Amino acid sequence: MFKKQKKIRKPCLRALKFLFAGVLTAGAVSVLGGCAVREHIKQKLLDYYGWEEIYTEDGSESEETSETSQVPGEAFGDEEEESDKEFLNESEEGLAASEEGLINGQERQEGQDLPIGETTAENTGEIPLPSRFDYRDVGKQPEVRDQGRFGTCWAFASLMAMESSLLPEESWKFSADHMSRKNSFFMEQEDGGQYAMSMAYLLAWQGPVLEEDDPYGDGISPDGLSPVKHVREIRLLESKNYQEIKRAVYQVGGVQSSLFTNLKDYTSRDQYYNETTYGYYYSGEEKANHNVVIIGWDDNYPKENFKQQPKEDGAFICQNSWGPRFGEQGCFYVSYEDTNIGDTNVYYTRIDTPVPGSRIYQSDLCGWIGQIGYGEEDAYFAAVYQAEENEYLTSVGFYATMPDTRYTVYAAEADAPGKMRLSHPLAQGSFKEAGFYTVELEKYVKLKAKEKFTVVVYISTPGAVHPVAIEYQASDLSGRVDLSDGEGYLSSDGKNWVSAEKNQNCNICLKAYTLPENKISDEDE
Protein backbone atom coordinates (compact mmCIF):
# COMPACT_ATOMS: atom_id res chain seq x y z
CA MET A 1 0.00 0.00 0.00
CA PHE A 2 1.41 3.32 -1.03
CA LYS A 3 1.13 6.32 1.26
CA LYS A 4 -0.01 9.45 -0.51
CA GLN A 5 2.93 11.85 -1.00
CA LYS A 6 2.46 15.21 0.69
CA LYS A 7 2.43 18.02 -1.85
CA ILE A 8 5.39 20.37 -1.71
CA ARG A 9 4.41 23.79 -0.48
CA LYS A 10 5.29 26.76 -2.62
CA PRO A 11 7.27 29.50 -0.92
CA CYS A 12 6.07 33.07 -1.26
CA LEU A 13 8.42 35.99 -1.69
CA ARG A 14 8.47 39.42 -0.18
CA ALA A 15 10.64 42.28 -1.42
CA LEU A 16 12.47 44.77 0.73
CA LYS A 17 11.86 48.38 -0.19
CA PHE A 18 15.51 49.13 -0.85
CA LEU A 19 16.67 52.61 0.01
CA PHE A 20 19.30 53.60 -2.53
CA ALA A 21 20.43 56.80 -0.86
CA GLY A 22 22.58 57.77 2.02
CA VAL A 23 19.61 56.93 4.14
CA LEU A 24 18.06 54.15 6.11
CA THR A 25 14.27 54.62 5.97
CA ALA A 26 11.57 54.23 3.35
CA GLY A 27 10.09 56.95 1.14
CA ALA A 28 10.92 58.93 -1.96
CA VAL A 29 14.24 60.71 -1.90
CA SER A 30 15.20 63.79 -3.87
CA VAL A 31 18.72 64.66 -4.93
CA LEU A 32 20.27 66.50 -1.99
CA GLY A 33 23.97 67.12 -1.95
CA GLY A 34 26.40 64.35 -1.24
CA CYS A 35 24.22 61.51 -0.08
CA ALA A 36 20.88 61.43 -1.84
CA VAL A 37 20.30 59.37 -4.93
CA ARG A 38 18.73 59.69 -8.36
CA GLU A 39 14.96 59.72 -8.09
CA HIS A 40 14.49 56.79 -10.47
CA ILE A 41 16.03 54.42 -7.93
CA LYS A 42 13.34 53.16 -5.55
CA GLN A 43 13.86 52.33 -1.89
CA LYS A 44 13.55 48.94 -0.25
CA LEU A 45 13.82 48.24 3.47
CA LEU A 46 11.89 46.01 5.85
CA ASP A 47 8.75 47.45 7.40
CA TYR A 48 9.98 46.61 10.87
CA TYR A 49 12.72 49.19 10.46
CA GLY A 50 10.81 51.68 8.37
CA TRP A 51 10.82 49.31 5.40
CA GLU A 52 7.56 48.78 3.56
CA GLU A 53 5.98 45.47 2.67
CA ILE A 54 4.96 45.43 -0.98
CA TYR A 55 3.67 41.96 -1.69
CA THR A 56 0.10 41.00 -2.52
CA GLU A 57 -1.51 37.67 -1.85
CA ASP A 58 -2.82 35.36 -4.55
CA GLY A 59 -5.23 32.52 -3.89
CA SER A 60 -3.65 29.30 -2.74
CA GLU A 61 -3.87 26.12 -4.81
CA SER A 62 -4.72 23.95 -1.85
CA GLU A 63 -4.30 23.63 1.85
CA GLU A 64 -0.70 22.62 1.29
CA THR A 65 0.19 25.45 -1.09
CA SER A 66 1.08 28.85 0.31
CA GLU A 67 0.17 32.18 -1.19
CA THR A 68 2.39 33.74 -3.85
CA SER A 69 3.66 37.26 -3.30
CA GLN A 70 4.12 39.84 -5.99
CA VAL A 71 5.49 43.31 -6.41
CA PRO A 72 3.08 45.39 -8.53
CA GLY A 73 4.01 44.95 -12.18
CA GLU A 74 6.60 42.29 -11.42
CA ALA A 75 5.96 38.61 -10.76
CA PHE A 76 7.92 37.16 -7.89
CA GLY A 77 5.82 34.12 -7.09
CA ASP A 78 6.84 31.42 -9.55
CA GLU A 79 3.73 29.97 -11.21
CA GLU A 80 5.60 27.05 -12.75
CA GLU A 81 4.92 23.49 -11.77
CA GLU A 82 6.78 22.36 -8.69
CA SER A 83 10.18 20.83 -9.18
CA ASP A 84 10.13 17.07 -9.34
CA LYS A 85 13.16 16.95 -7.08
CA GLU A 86 11.62 15.56 -3.91
CA PHE A 87 14.58 14.35 -1.97
CA LEU A 88 13.98 11.70 0.68
CA ASN A 89 15.81 12.06 3.98
CA GLU A 90 17.73 8.85 3.91
CA SER A 91 21.44 8.97 4.44
CA GLU A 92 24.13 11.14 5.92
CA GLU A 93 23.60 12.57 9.36
CA GLY A 94 24.76 15.80 10.86
CA LEU A 95 27.35 15.82 13.64
CA ALA A 96 27.09 16.38 17.37
CA ALA A 97 25.15 19.38 18.66
CA SER A 98 26.87 22.51 19.89
CA GLU A 99 25.86 25.80 21.45
CA GLU A 100 26.42 29.00 19.48
CA GLY A 101 29.31 31.20 20.49
CA LEU A 102 29.65 34.90 19.67
CA ILE A 103 32.28 37.54 20.13
CA ASN A 104 30.86 41.05 20.04
CA GLY A 105 32.48 44.41 19.62
CA GLN A 106 36.06 43.19 19.67
CA GLU A 107 38.69 41.84 17.35
CA ARG A 108 38.96 38.08 17.22
CA GLN A 109 41.25 35.70 15.38
CA GLU A 110 39.30 33.41 13.04
CA GLY A 111 39.30 29.85 14.27
CA GLN A 112 40.11 30.93 17.82
CA ASP A 113 38.19 29.12 20.56
CA LEU A 114 35.29 31.08 21.98
CA PRO A 115 36.02 31.86 25.64
CA ILE A 116 33.40 30.79 28.15
CA GLY A 117 31.90 33.76 29.96
CA GLU A 118 33.18 36.26 27.41
CA THR A 119 31.59 39.70 27.70
CA THR A 120 28.99 40.12 24.97
CA ALA A 121 26.33 42.62 24.03
CA GLU A 122 23.77 40.33 25.67
CA ASN A 123 25.27 39.51 29.03
CA THR A 124 26.31 43.08 29.82
CA GLY A 125 22.87 44.50 29.08
CA GLU A 126 22.22 45.69 32.64
CA ILE A 127 25.20 48.05 32.96
CA PRO A 128 23.85 51.47 34.04
CA LEU A 129 24.20 54.16 31.40
CA PRO A 130 25.52 57.64 32.24
CA SER A 131 23.54 60.77 31.34
CA ARG A 132 26.37 61.84 29.04
CA PHE A 133 28.87 59.77 27.07
CA ASP A 134 31.19 60.86 24.26
CA TYR A 135 33.75 58.87 22.27
CA ARG A 136 35.88 62.02 22.10
CA ASP A 137 36.45 61.68 25.84
CA VAL A 138 37.40 57.99 25.91
CA GLY A 139 39.62 57.47 22.87
CA LYS A 140 37.02 55.73 20.70
CA GLN A 141 36.38 58.48 18.16
CA PRO A 142 37.44 57.49 14.63
CA GLU A 143 39.15 60.02 12.38
CA VAL A 144 36.77 62.62 10.94
CA ARG A 145 36.58 62.21 7.16
CA ASP A 146 35.29 64.31 4.27
CA GLN A 147 33.15 62.78 1.52
CA GLY A 148 33.53 65.84 -0.68
CA ARG A 149 31.16 66.15 -3.63
CA PHE A 150 30.24 62.44 -3.82
CA GLY A 151 27.19 60.64 -2.42
CA THR A 152 29.24 58.37 -0.19
CA CYS A 153 28.02 59.23 3.32
CA TRP A 154 26.74 55.65 3.61
CA ALA A 155 30.26 54.25 3.06
CA PHE A 156 31.95 56.70 5.42
CA ALA A 157 29.34 56.10 8.12
CA SER A 158 29.74 52.33 7.86
CA LEU A 159 33.52 52.43 8.00
CA MET A 160 33.72 55.02 10.78
CA ALA A 161 31.30 52.93 12.84
CA MET A 162 33.52 49.89 12.23
CA GLU A 163 36.67 51.80 13.13
CA SER A 164 35.11 52.96 16.39
CA SER A 165 34.23 49.36 17.29
CA LEU A 166 37.92 48.45 17.11
CA LEU A 167 39.14 51.49 19.06
CA PRO A 168 40.97 52.12 21.31
CA GLU A 169 42.86 48.81 21.07
CA GLU A 170 43.20 49.01 17.29
CA SER A 171 43.35 52.10 15.09
CA TRP A 172 42.36 51.69 11.44
CA LYS A 173 41.52 53.90 8.48
CA PHE A 174 39.49 51.93 5.96
CA SER A 175 38.92 52.96 2.35
CA ALA A 176 35.54 54.48 1.51
CA ASP A 177 36.70 54.68 -2.10
CA HIS A 178 36.97 50.90 -2.29
CA MET A 179 33.63 50.28 -0.57
CA SER A 180 31.80 52.69 -2.89
CA ARG A 181 33.53 51.55 -6.10
CA LYS A 182 34.30 47.84 -5.63
CA ASN A 183 31.00 46.48 -4.39
CA SER A 184 28.57 44.36 -6.43
CA PHE A 185 26.01 47.09 -7.10
CA PHE A 186 27.81 48.88 -9.96
CA MET A 187 26.67 52.36 -8.96
CA GLU A 188 28.62 55.54 -9.44
CA GLN A 189 29.83 57.42 -6.38
CA GLU A 190 27.52 60.29 -7.34
CA ASP A 191 24.50 57.97 -7.13
CA GLY A 192 24.53 57.51 -3.35
CA GLY A 193 23.91 54.25 -1.57
CA GLN A 194 22.64 52.74 1.66
CA TYR A 195 23.68 50.51 4.50
CA ALA A 196 22.56 47.21 2.92
CA MET A 197 25.23 47.85 0.28
CA SER A 198 27.81 48.27 3.03
CA MET A 199 26.65 45.05 4.66
CA ALA A 200 26.82 43.10 1.41
CA TYR A 201 30.32 44.38 0.61
CA LEU A 202 31.71 43.67 4.07
CA LEU A 203 30.00 40.32 4.62
CA ALA A 204 31.17 39.08 1.20
CA TRP A 205 34.75 39.90 2.27
CA GLN A 206 35.16 42.29 -0.65
CA GLY A 207 36.64 44.64 1.94
CA PRO A 208 37.52 46.57 3.96
CA VAL A 209 40.89 47.62 2.59
CA LEU A 210 43.19 50.35 3.81
CA GLU A 211 42.75 53.98 2.82
CA GLU A 212 46.43 54.14 1.89
CA ASP A 213 45.90 51.33 -0.63
CA ASP A 214 42.88 52.98 -2.25
CA PRO A 215 42.85 56.75 -1.52
CA TYR A 216 39.53 58.56 -1.71
CA GLY A 217 38.47 60.72 -4.61
CA ASP A 218 41.16 59.92 -7.18
CA GLY A 219 38.78 58.13 -9.55
CA ILE A 220 40.81 54.92 -9.34
CA SER A 221 40.25 51.77 -7.31
CA PRO A 222 42.87 49.06 -7.81
CA ASP A 223 41.95 45.45 -8.50
CA GLY A 224 43.20 42.60 -6.38
CA LEU A 225 43.17 44.21 -2.93
CA SER A 226 42.46 41.77 -0.11
CA PRO A 227 40.38 42.64 2.96
CA VAL A 228 42.38 43.50 6.05
CA LYS A 229 39.48 42.43 8.28
CA HIS A 230 36.71 39.86 8.00
CA VAL A 231 33.33 41.14 9.16
CA ARG A 232 31.29 38.28 10.60
CA GLU A 233 28.42 39.98 12.42
CA ILE A 234 26.33 43.14 11.88
CA ARG A 235 23.29 43.92 13.99
CA LEU A 236 20.19 46.06 13.38
CA LEU A 237 18.53 47.74 16.33
CA GLU A 238 14.83 48.34 16.69
CA SER A 239 13.59 51.73 15.49
CA LYS A 240 13.72 54.55 18.05
CA ASN A 241 14.86 52.28 20.89
CA TYR A 242 17.16 54.89 22.39
CA GLN A 243 18.24 52.81 25.38
CA GLU A 244 19.50 50.03 23.12
CA ILE A 245 21.20 52.53 20.82
CA LYS A 246 23.00 54.04 23.78
CA ARG A 247 23.92 50.62 25.11
CA ALA A 248 25.40 49.61 21.74
CA VAL A 249 27.47 52.81 21.64
CA TYR A 250 28.55 52.36 25.26
CA GLN A 251 29.52 48.70 24.99
CA VAL A 252 30.42 48.03 21.37
CA GLY A 253 30.89 50.82 18.83
CA GLY A 254 29.34 53.67 16.90
CA VAL A 255 25.82 53.19 15.57
CA GLN A 256 25.20 54.10 11.93
CA SER A 257 21.94 56.01 11.61
CA SER A 258 20.43 58.71 9.41
CA LEU A 259 18.59 62.00 9.25
CA PHE A 260 16.99 64.38 6.78
CA THR A 261 18.92 67.53 5.95
CA ASN A 262 19.10 70.28 3.35
CA LEU A 263 22.75 70.77 4.25
CA LYS A 264 25.24 69.66 1.63
CA ASP A 265 28.63 70.30 3.24
CA TYR A 266 30.33 72.33 5.97
CA THR A 267 29.55 75.62 4.19
CA SER A 268 25.79 75.01 4.04
CA ARG A 269 23.17 76.70 6.22
CA ASP A 270 19.51 75.88 6.83
CA GLN A 271 16.67 76.50 9.26
CA TYR A 272 17.18 73.27 11.21
CA TYR A 273 20.87 73.60 12.07
CA ASN A 274 22.32 76.02 14.61
CA GLU A 275 25.87 76.64 13.45
CA THR A 276 26.72 78.35 16.76
CA THR A 277 25.68 75.54 19.14
CA TYR A 278 26.00 72.72 16.56
CA GLY A 279 22.46 71.59 17.35
CA TYR A 280 20.24 69.97 14.72
CA TYR A 281 16.52 69.24 14.94
CA TYR A 282 14.08 68.40 12.16
CA SER A 283 10.44 67.60 13.00
CA GLY A 284 8.97 67.37 9.51
CA GLU A 285 7.83 64.39 7.45
CA GLU A 286 10.68 64.13 4.95
CA LYS A 287 12.49 60.82 4.97
CA ALA A 288 16.15 60.52 5.83
CA ASN A 289 18.74 61.27 3.14
CA HIS A 290 22.06 61.36 4.99
CA ASN A 291 24.03 58.86 7.08
CA VAL A 292 25.91 59.74 10.26
CA VAL A 293 27.46 57.81 13.15
CA ILE A 294 26.13 58.11 16.69
CA ILE A 295 29.23 58.31 18.93
CA GLY A 296 27.60 59.43 22.16
CA TRP A 297 24.75 61.30 23.79
CA ASP A 298 23.94 64.08 26.24
CA ASP A 299 20.61 63.80 28.06
CA ASN A 300 20.97 67.36 29.29
CA TYR A 301 21.84 69.07 26.02
CA PRO A 302 19.63 72.19 26.20
CA LYS A 303 16.59 72.31 23.96
CA GLU A 304 17.29 76.03 23.61
CA ASN A 305 20.36 75.15 21.51
CA PHE A 306 18.19 74.16 18.55
CA LYS A 307 16.87 76.70 16.06
CA GLN A 308 13.45 75.08 16.19
CA GLN A 309 12.94 74.09 19.78
CA PRO A 310 11.89 70.53 20.71
CA LYS A 311 9.85 69.77 23.81
CA GLU A 312 12.65 68.25 25.87
CA ASP A 313 16.40 68.46 26.41
CA GLY A 314 18.69 65.76 25.08
CA ALA A 315 20.64 64.89 21.94
CA PHE A 316 22.73 62.22 20.30
CA ILE A 317 26.32 63.22 19.55
CA CYS A 318 26.85 62.39 15.89
CA GLN A 319 29.96 62.30 13.71
CA ASN A 320 29.48 63.57 10.17
CA SER A 321 31.49 63.00 6.98
CA TRP A 322 31.94 66.64 5.96
CA GLY A 323 35.40 67.10 7.44
CA PRO A 324 36.56 68.81 10.67
CA ARG A 325 35.36 72.24 9.51
CA PHE A 326 31.76 71.16 9.99
CA GLY A 327 30.23 71.59 13.44
CA GLU A 328 32.37 70.85 16.47
CA GLN A 329 35.42 69.43 14.67
CA GLY A 330 33.17 67.24 12.55
CA CYS A 331 30.55 66.44 15.19
CA PHE A 332 27.13 67.86 16.03
CA TYR A 333 24.13 67.29 18.32
CA VAL A 334 20.89 65.81 16.99
CA SER A 335 17.78 66.15 19.15
CA TYR A 336 16.22 62.96 20.48
CA GLU A 337 12.97 64.28 18.99
CA ASP A 338 14.35 64.50 15.45
CA THR A 339 12.05 62.69 13.01
CA ASN A 340 14.63 60.30 11.59
CA ILE A 341 17.58 59.88 13.92
CA GLY A 342 17.52 56.44 15.51
CA ASP A 343 14.92 55.13 13.09
CA THR A 344 17.28 52.67 11.46
CA ASN A 345 20.41 51.66 13.36
CA VAL A 346 23.35 49.50 12.34
CA TYR A 347 26.34 48.46 14.40
CA TYR A 348 29.28 46.17 13.74
CA THR A 349 29.70 43.53 16.41
CA ARG A 350 32.23 41.02 15.14
CA ILE A 351 35.30 41.97 13.13
CA ASP A 352 37.97 39.28 12.79
CA THR A 353 41.60 39.26 11.78
CA PRO A 354 41.86 37.10 8.63
CA VAL A 355 43.52 33.71 8.94
CA PRO A 356 45.68 32.66 5.96
CA GLY A 357 43.84 30.02 3.96
CA SER A 358 40.41 30.80 5.38
CA ARG A 359 37.68 30.63 2.77
CA ILE A 360 34.11 31.86 2.37
CA TYR A 361 31.52 30.04 0.25
CA GLN A 362 28.61 32.21 -0.84
CA SER A 363 26.25 33.08 -3.69
CA ASP A 364 24.73 36.35 -2.38
CA LEU A 365 27.23 39.07 -3.24
CA CYS A 366 24.44 41.69 -3.22
CA GLY A 367 23.26 40.43 0.15
CA TRP A 368 19.81 40.76 1.67
CA ILE A 369 17.51 42.09 -1.08
CA GLY A 370 14.24 40.39 -0.16
CA GLN A 371 12.64 37.68 1.94
CA ILE A 372 10.86 34.43 1.23
CA GLY A 373 8.83 31.94 3.18
CA TYR A 374 5.63 29.93 3.43
CA GLY A 375 3.36 32.45 5.11
CA GLU A 376 4.59 31.26 8.50
CA GLU A 377 7.28 32.27 10.94
CA ASP A 378 9.43 29.20 10.36
CA ALA A 379 11.11 27.62 7.33
CA TYR A 380 14.10 25.56 6.28
CA PHE A 381 16.73 26.79 3.86
CA ALA A 382 19.89 25.19 2.54
CA ALA A 383 22.97 25.80 0.40
CA VAL A 384 25.15 23.29 -1.42
CA TYR A 385 28.80 24.07 -2.18
CA GLN A 386 31.82 22.20 -3.53
CA ALA A 387 34.95 22.19 -1.38
CA GLU A 388 37.99 23.73 -3.06
CA GLU A 389 40.46 21.62 -1.10
CA ASN A 390 40.73 19.32 1.88
CA GLU A 391 39.47 21.62 4.62
CA TYR A 392 37.09 21.96 7.54
CA LEU A 393 33.72 23.65 7.72
CA THR A 394 33.94 25.69 10.92
CA SER A 395 30.97 28.08 10.84
CA VAL A 396 28.01 29.32 8.83
CA GLY A 397 26.51 32.78 8.37
CA PHE A 398 22.95 33.94 7.73
CA TYR A 399 20.46 36.73 8.46
CA ALA A 400 17.91 37.08 11.20
CA THR A 401 15.29 39.20 9.44
CA MET A 402 13.56 40.21 12.69
CA PRO A 403 14.42 40.09 16.41
CA ASP A 404 14.21 36.98 18.61
CA THR A 405 14.97 34.60 15.76
CA ARG A 406 15.65 30.99 16.76
CA TYR A 407 17.75 28.68 14.61
CA THR A 408 19.10 25.16 14.25
CA VAL A 409 22.06 24.36 11.98
CA TYR A 410 22.92 21.07 10.26
CA ALA A 411 25.78 20.27 7.88
CA ALA A 412 27.40 17.25 6.26
CA GLU A 413 29.21 16.01 3.19
CA ALA A 414 26.15 15.59 0.98
CA ASP A 415 25.20 16.85 -2.46
CA ALA A 416 21.61 17.81 -1.53
CA PRO A 417 19.68 18.67 1.64
CA GLY A 418 17.24 15.83 1.02
CA LYS A 419 20.08 13.36 1.52
CA MET A 420 20.64 14.48 5.11
CA ARG A 421 18.81 13.24 8.17
CA LEU A 422 18.10 16.33 10.23
CA SER A 423 18.29 14.64 13.61
CA HIS A 424 21.63 15.78 15.06
CA PRO A 425 22.11 19.56 14.87
CA LEU A 426 25.52 21.17 14.82
CA ALA A 427 24.34 24.34 16.54
CA GLN A 428 21.21 25.79 18.11
CA GLY A 429 20.45 29.18 19.57
CA SER A 430 18.68 32.50 19.13
CA PHE A 431 19.41 36.09 18.19
CA LYS A 432 17.96 38.95 20.20
CA GLU A 433 18.37 41.47 17.38
CA ALA A 434 17.93 41.36 13.63
CA GLY A 435 21.07 41.31 11.49
CA PHE A 436 23.71 38.99 10.06
CA TYR A 437 25.32 36.43 12.33
CA THR A 438 28.07 33.85 12.11
CA VAL A 439 27.33 30.67 14.03
CA GLU A 440 30.35 28.66 15.15
CA LEU A 441 30.30 24.86 14.98
CA GLU A 442 31.73 23.00 17.97
CA LYS A 443 32.43 19.89 15.92
CA TYR A 444 33.92 20.87 12.58
CA VAL A 445 32.93 19.03 9.40
CA LYS A 446 35.83 17.52 7.44
CA LEU A 447 35.52 18.23 3.73
CA LYS A 448 37.24 16.54 0.82
CA ALA A 449 38.53 18.47 -2.16
CA LYS A 450 36.02 18.74 -5.03
CA GLU A 451 33.31 16.99 -3.00
CA LYS A 452 30.00 18.70 -2.30
CA PHE A 453 28.75 19.63 1.15
CA THR A 454 25.41 20.95 2.34
CA VAL A 455 24.42 23.37 5.07
CA VAL A 456 20.81 23.39 6.31
CA VAL A 457 19.26 25.98 8.65
CA TYR A 458 15.88 25.79 10.34
CA ILE A 459 14.75 29.26 11.31
CA SER A 460 11.83 30.54 13.37
CA THR A 461 11.18 34.28 13.48
CA PRO A 462 8.24 35.47 15.63
CA GLY A 463 5.87 37.69 13.68
CA ALA A 464 7.39 36.90 10.28
CA VAL A 465 5.69 35.25 7.32
CA HIS A 466 8.79 35.36 5.10
CA PRO A 467 11.70 34.68 7.47
CA VAL A 468 14.42 33.70 4.97
CA ALA A 469 16.70 36.39 3.51
CA ILE A 470 17.37 36.12 -0.22
CA GLU A 471 19.19 37.87 -3.05
CA TYR A 472 17.26 38.38 -6.28
CA GLN A 473 17.26 40.69 -9.30
CA ALA A 474 14.84 43.40 -8.19
CA SER A 475 13.67 45.70 -10.98
CA ASP A 476 15.37 48.71 -9.39
CA LEU A 477 18.53 46.91 -8.30
CA SER A 478 21.60 48.17 -10.11
CA GLY A 479 23.67 45.13 -9.19
CA ARG A 480 23.69 42.05 -11.38
CA VAL A 481 22.54 39.00 -9.43
CA ASP A 482 24.13 35.77 -10.67
CA LEU A 483 21.86 32.76 -10.22
CA SER A 484 24.45 30.40 -11.66
CA ASP A 485 26.91 30.71 -8.79
CA GLY A 486 24.84 28.98 -6.13
CA GLU A 487 22.66 25.99 -5.33
CA GLY A 488 20.04 26.88 -2.76
CA TYR A 489 16.91 25.14 -1.52
CA LEU A 490 13.76 25.92 0.46
CA SER A 491 11.44 23.70 2.45
CA SER A 492 8.48 24.05 4.77
CA ASP A 493 9.13 20.78 6.60
CA GLY A 494 12.82 19.87 6.10
CA LYS A 495 11.85 16.90 3.93
CA ASN A 496 10.51 18.21 0.65
CA TRP A 497 12.78 20.74 -1.02
CA VAL A 498 12.49 23.10 -4.00
CA SER A 499 15.27 24.90 -5.82
CA ALA A 500 15.57 28.59 -4.95
CA GLU A 501 17.24 29.42 -8.26
CA LYS A 502 14.95 27.40 -10.53
CA ASN A 503 11.62 27.89 -8.75
CA GLN A 504 11.98 31.38 -7.28
CA ASN A 505 14.82 33.02 -9.28
CA CYS A 506 16.76 33.90 -6.15
CA ASN A 507 19.86 33.00 -4.18
CA ILE A 508 19.64 31.95 -0.55
CA CYS A 509 21.64 34.16 1.82
CA LEU A 510 23.59 31.42 3.53
CA LYS A 511 27.39 31.50 3.75
CA ALA A 512 29.83 28.77 4.80
CA TYR A 513 33.29 29.37 6.27
CA THR A 514 36.20 26.96 6.19
CA LEU A 515 39.77 26.71 7.46
CA PRO A 516 42.60 24.65 5.96
CA GLU A 517 43.60 21.39 7.62
CA ASN A 518 46.80 22.87 9.08
CA LYS A 519 44.78 25.42 11.07
CA ILE A 520 42.68 22.80 12.87
CA SER A 521 43.72 21.16 16.12
CA ASP A 522 43.09 17.47 16.83
CA GLU A 523 40.37 18.25 19.36
CA ASP A 524 38.33 20.12 16.75
CA GLU A 525 38.21 17.20 14.33
Image (cartoon, helix red, strand yellow):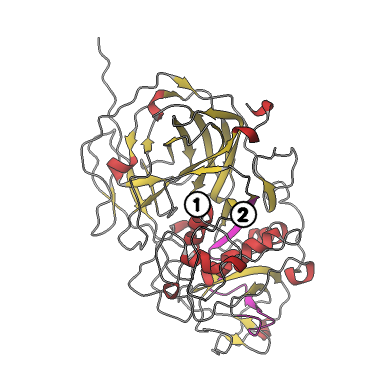
Query: Residue 31 vs residue 162: left or right?
Result: left
Asked whether 520 falls inside the magenta stretch, the response is no
Q: Position of residue 186 (x, y in %)?
A: 39, 64
Which quadrant holds residue 494? top left
**Amino acid on which the number 1 mark rests in the picture:** Ala
**Amino acid on which the number 2 mark rests in the picture:** Lys
Mark 2–mark 1 distance (CA, rounded to whole Å): 11 Å
Asked whether 348 falls inside the magenta stretch, the response is yes
**Residue 229, label in figure:** 2
Crowd band around label 1 with a 10 angstrom C-alpha radius: few (<14), some (14–19), many (20+): many
From the viewer's side, name the closer residue of 479 and 132: 479
Crowd band around label 2 with a 10 angstrom C-alpha radius: few (<14), some (14–19), many (20+): many
Residue 152 sits above or below residue 375 on the image = below
Callouts 2 and 1 close, C-beta under 8 Å: no
Q: Position of residue 441 (x, y in %)?
A: 59, 34
Which quadrant holds residue 81? top left
Bounds of the magenta segment: 323-352
Name the residue located 36 percent from the left edge and 67 percent from the top edge.
42
From the viewer's side, name the closer residue of 334 and 144: 144
- The total number of labels drawn is 2
Pointer 1: what residue?
Answer: 204
Name the residue located 72 percent from the left edge and 72 percent from the top edge.
298
Q: Position of residue 461 (x, y in %)?
A: 48, 43
Name the residue located 27 percent from the left edge and 29 percent from the top edge.
7
Quarter occupied by the C terminus: top right
Judged from the image, the secondary structure of the residue bearing numbered disc 2 is loop
Judged from the image, the secondary structure of the residue bearing numbered disc 1 is loop
From the viewer's side, name the closer residue of 61 and 423: 423
Which quadrant holds residue 272? bottom right
Q: Position of residue 163 (x, y in %)?
A: 66, 63
Name the residue located 64 percent from the left edge and 50 percent from the top edge.
352
